[in-house]
Image (tube, coloured by chain):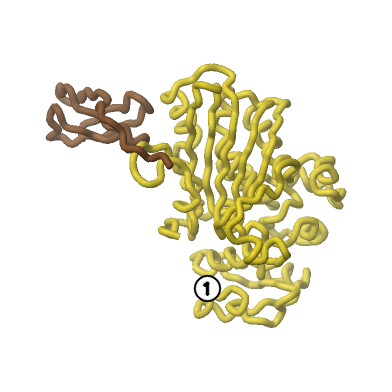
Chain colours: A yellow, B brown
């Protein structure tokens, strides 16, 4: 049994963490914090948890976390956790960070992609990028795990097998990512107002999305190459949860369906949360967020375009689970030596 | 169970022990429909079933 804290527990990812942790057989929630809702019952903010817990949010105090927790999830806005995580590390706590603060290895990428200089660049090498499918053994021994961005992990999981196999042009990758409204977080704005958001297919970040940096970083690692160029366009679409990443790549040599299948199968053999979806029959013939919402699965598929010599790799996941809180719990399981899928086996809701 | 392999995606396909020639099996991975054309002991040979596909376009 591990005593955990959740910092920033009132957001959507915080709420999903609590939903998973409250029924996790090896977890005791020792501390959960929210500046805005300190003193309030959890179920007043996360109504799906009514009847499951009488916990209340507490004001964030670092020394309380140090005294009461062995592992802390940090679900704070970007740029916040890097200010207090050093104290928690110094006290020997294990950290699973859901923000972007420790995802990038090169300190120079922070001013470029996030607009601020990292306050503790010496910790970036210590952090392990929290995609178990790529870094499982490093995560097992890690004190600090940086969970990936939701659009980044969808894209990375779709592209890692062909990137490693050397069958695609790594300097010409185009990501078209469609995102549900929960990805915008819990703070409302004019653009998230129902009248503005409902029914949209909104290209909200056609160039320059921050997650581009993570995708390039990880594809370089998995391919062993220095030169990776990714172009990402992000769209807001009319769903609450879910991401579909359509990854357009150009083949560097001819391959057939059987070889492509072999590449994906070999890369993901035995992975508990990866499903290949490339079917001729049934309702869901390629990955669709509708079939993964509420689960920690990432569905992956592909098609080969003979005309344009493309490999189109597709992935679908729930942005709040495999894209945030689900993968965070998967990482905690690895860090603590629990079975990797403990507390995460629930199938997707369907239909949603 | 007997085994065969999908000629397109390479998936291993389990086939019932009492399978007969002419029976149709479906690849669990890619959904390709296959016709059993020969059985010799544990070896089951299949070929792609030719049918007109349903229109799933929009």
Q: Which residue shows up at 50% across the image and 26% down it?
A: A305
Q: Quadrant of residue A34?
A: bottom right
A290 up-or-down from A25: above or below:
above
> Quick check: B41 above or below A69?
above
Label 1, residues with CA under 10 Å away: few <14, some 14-19, many ≥20: few
Hey, which residue is sitting farthest top in the picture?
Answer: A253
List x then y, in percent, for residue A69.
67, 67
Label 1 resides on the chain identified as A
The residue where tag 1 is placed is A48
Q: Helix, strand, or loop for circle 1?
A: helix
| Residue A157 in picture, x, y percent from top left | 56, 40
Q: Is residue A346 visible?
A: no
Seen at 64% across and 48% down, the residue is: A235
Q: Of residues A117 and A125, which is closer to you in this image?
A: A117
Where is residue A189 shown, x and y percent of the image? 73, 65
Q: What is the count of numbered marks?
A: 1
Q: Quadrant of the N terminus of chain A?
A: bottom right
Q: Nearer the viewer, residue A330 or A169?
A: A169
Q: In the image shown, does B44 or B42 lie closer to the viewer?
A: B44
Horizontal placement of A335 versus B17: left or right?
right
Closer to the camera in the image, A97 or A115: A115
Residue at image point 69% right, 34% down: A230
């Amino acid at each position: 049994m591990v005593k955990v804290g959740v910092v920033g527990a009132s957001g959507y990812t915080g709420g999903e963490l609590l939903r998973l942790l409250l029924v996790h057989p090896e977890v005791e929630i020792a501390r959960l914090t929210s500046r805005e809702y300190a003193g309030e019952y959890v179920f007043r903010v996360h109504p799906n948890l009514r009847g499951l817990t009488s916990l209340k949010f507490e004001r964030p105090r670092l020394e309380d976390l140090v005294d009461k927790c062995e592992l802390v999830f940090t679900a704070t806005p970007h740029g916040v956790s890097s200010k207090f995580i050093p104290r928690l590390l110094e006290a020997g706590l294990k950290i699973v960070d859901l923000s972007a603060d420790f995802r990038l290895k090169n300190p120079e990428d922070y001013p470029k992609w996030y607009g601020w200089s990292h306050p503790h660049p010496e910790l970036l090498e210590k952090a392990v990028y929290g995609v178990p499918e790529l870094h499982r053994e490093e995560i097992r021994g890690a004190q600090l795990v940086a969970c990936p961005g939701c659009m980044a992990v969808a894209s990375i999981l779709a592209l890692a097998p062909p990137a490693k196999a050397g069958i695609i042009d790594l300097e010409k990758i185009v990501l078209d990512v469609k995102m549900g409204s929960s990805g915008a977080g819990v703070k409302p704005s004019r653009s998230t107002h129902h009248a503005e958001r409902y029914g949209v297919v909104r290209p909200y970040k056609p160039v320059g999305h921050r997650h581009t940096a993570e995708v390039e970083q990880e594809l370089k690692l998995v391919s062993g190459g220095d030169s990776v160029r990714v172009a990402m366009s992000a769209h807001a679409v009319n769903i609450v949860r879910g991401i579909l990443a359509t990854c357009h790549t150009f083949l560097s040599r001819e391959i057939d369906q059987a070889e492509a299948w072999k590449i994906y199968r070999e890369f993901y053999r035995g992975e508990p949360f990866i499903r290949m979806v490339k079917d001729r029959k049934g309702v869901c013939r390629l990955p669709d967020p509708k079939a993964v919402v509420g689960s920690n699965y990432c569905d992956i598929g592909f098609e080969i375009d003979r005309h344009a010599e493309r490999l189109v790799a597709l992935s679908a996941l729930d942005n709040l689970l495999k894209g945030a809180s689900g993968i965070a719990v998967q990482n905690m399981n690895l860090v603590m030596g629990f079975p990797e899928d403990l507390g995460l086996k629930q199938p997707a809701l369907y239909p949603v | 169970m007997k085994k065969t392999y999908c000629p397109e995606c390479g998936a291993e396909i389990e086939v019932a022990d009492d399978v007969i020639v002419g029976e149709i099996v479906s690849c669990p991975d890619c959904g390709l429909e296959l016709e059993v054309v020969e059985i010799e002991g544990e070896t089951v040979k299949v070929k792609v079933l030719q049918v007109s596909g349903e229109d799933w376009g929009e």
